[in-house]
Amino acid sequence: MDITRSDFQYLEEELNAILVERAFQARSLKLMTMHELGLAVLTSPLYEGNRAALLRDLAHVLPIGRTEFYACIQFAEQHPDLEAFMSAHADKRLSWAQVKRSLLPANPAPRMPIDRRAAAGFSKAAIGTVWTERDHAHIKELLGYE
C-alpha cells in the first residue's frame, strides 16, 4: 500500500488532536485532584488543631510537600466551587503551576534560622547511620516543634 501525502497528513492531524485533548484532560484532572486534596484537609477535624504539624506530618507520609498542601488548601478556600472555576477558565489551558502562582504569596515568609552551634554535632560522618528517636526529638527541639 502506498502512503499518500493526504493520508499521512490526516493521520498526523488525528494524532495531534489526541495529544492535545489528552493533555487538556491531564491538566484538568490535576486541578481536580489538588482541589479535592485541599477540600479533604479543610474539612478534616484534624485541621482544627495544629495545622502546621498536621501538614508537616502529611508531607512525610504522602508524596506531596507542605507547600503543595498549602496551595491545595488555598485553592479550595478561594474557589470552593470547582465547576464554576473550571467553567470560568474553560477558554484557558490552566495548569496547576499557573494556579499555584496565582495563589501563593510572591514573598513567602522567611524560614526559621537554624542554630549552627547546636547543629554542629551532626557531622557528615553521621549521615547514613540509623536515625534514633532521640535524634528526632533533638531536631524537633532545635526547630521549635512541640
Image (spheres, helix red, strand yellow):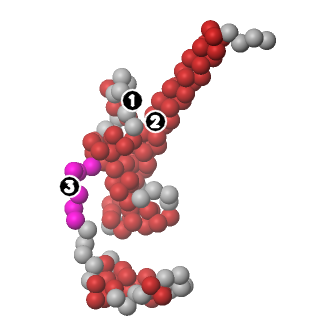
Q: Residues within 10 Å of mark 1 (few under 14, many from 20)?
A: few
Which quarter of the figure has residue 50? bottom left
Counting residues from the N terminus, which is met first, the one under dot 1 or under dot 3?
1
- Per the image, the residue denoted by label 1 is 93
The question of residue 109 being in magenta is answered with: yes
Quadrant of the frame with the N terminus: top right
- Per the image, the residue denoted by label 3 is 107
Question: Is residue 6 among what the camera can see?
Answer: yes
The question of residue 138 being in magenta is answered with: no
Q: Is residue 40 left or right of residue 2?
A: left
Q: Residue furthest right?
A: 1
- Per the image, the residue denoted by label 2 is 27
Q: Which residues are magenta?
A: 104-110
**Real-space Cα separation, disc 2 to disc 1, in angstroms:** 8 Å
> Which amino acid, by three-letter code, is at mark 3?
Asn
Label 3 SS: loop
Q: Residue at 21% of width from left, 62% of height from top?
A: 109
Principal secondary structure, stretch drawn in magenta: loop
Counting residues from the N terminus, which is met first, the one under dot 3 or under dot 2?
2
Q: Residue at 39% of width from left, 66% of height from top?
A: 56
> Which amino acid, by three-letter code, is at mark 1?
Arg
